[in-house]
Amino acid sequence: MKTVNRCPQCHHELDEGPIMYRCAHCRRAVYAADIDFEFVPRRPVAA
């Protein structure tokens, strides 16, 4: 499962990780502990 983390300031996608992320748009560094994200499991695929 791939989660997309967003910058809390400008809401663009963050690069790098998993400990520290960087926003290429506003050049902000964000620690992973400061990011709020919700775990959403994938839906089961019908066989």
Image (cartoon, rainbow, N blue to C red):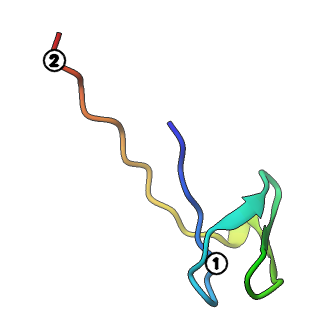
The kind of residue on which mark 1 rests is: Cys
Q: Is residue 26 above or below residue 16?
A: below
- The picture places residue 43, in percent across and down from the top left corner, at 25, 34
In percent of the image, x 23 and y 22: which residue is there?
45
Q: Disc 1 designates what residue?
A: 7
Q: Is residue 31 left or right of residue 2?
A: right
As drawn, which residue projects farthest toward the left?
46
- The picture places residue 8, in percent across and down from the top left corner, at 61, 83
Q: What SS does tag 2 mark?
A: loop
In percent of the image, x 55 and y 69: which residue is there?
36
In percent of the image, x 63 and y 69: which residue is there?
35
Say few, some or many: other residues with alpha carbon within 10 Å of mark 1 (under 14 / 14 to 19 / 20 or more): many
Locate the C terminus by quadrant. Answer: top left
Q: Which of 19 and 14 lies nearest the eye of the viewer? A: 14
Q: Is residue 13 left or right of residue 46?
A: right
Q: Which of 7 and 35 lies nearest the eye of the viewer? A: 7
Say few, some or many: other residues with alpha carbon within 10 Å of mark 2 (under 14 / 14 to 19 / 20 or more): few
Q: CA distance from mark 1 to mark 2?
A: 35 Å
Q: Residue 37 — which label?
A: none
Count of residue discs = 2
Q: Residue 46 — which label?
A: 2
The kind of residue on which mark 2 rests is: Ala
Q: Is residue 1 left or right of residue 20?
A: left
Tags 1 and 2 touching, CB below 8 Å: no
- The picture places residue 21, in percent across and down from the top left corner, at 79, 65
As drawn, which residue projects farthest toward the top?
47
Q: Is residue 32 left or right of residue 41?
A: right
As drawn, which residue projects farthest toward the front?
25
In percent of the image, x 75 and y 61: which residue is there?
15
Q: Going from the N terminus, do you reach mark 1 or mark 2 first?
A: 1
Q: What SS does tag 1 mark?
A: loop
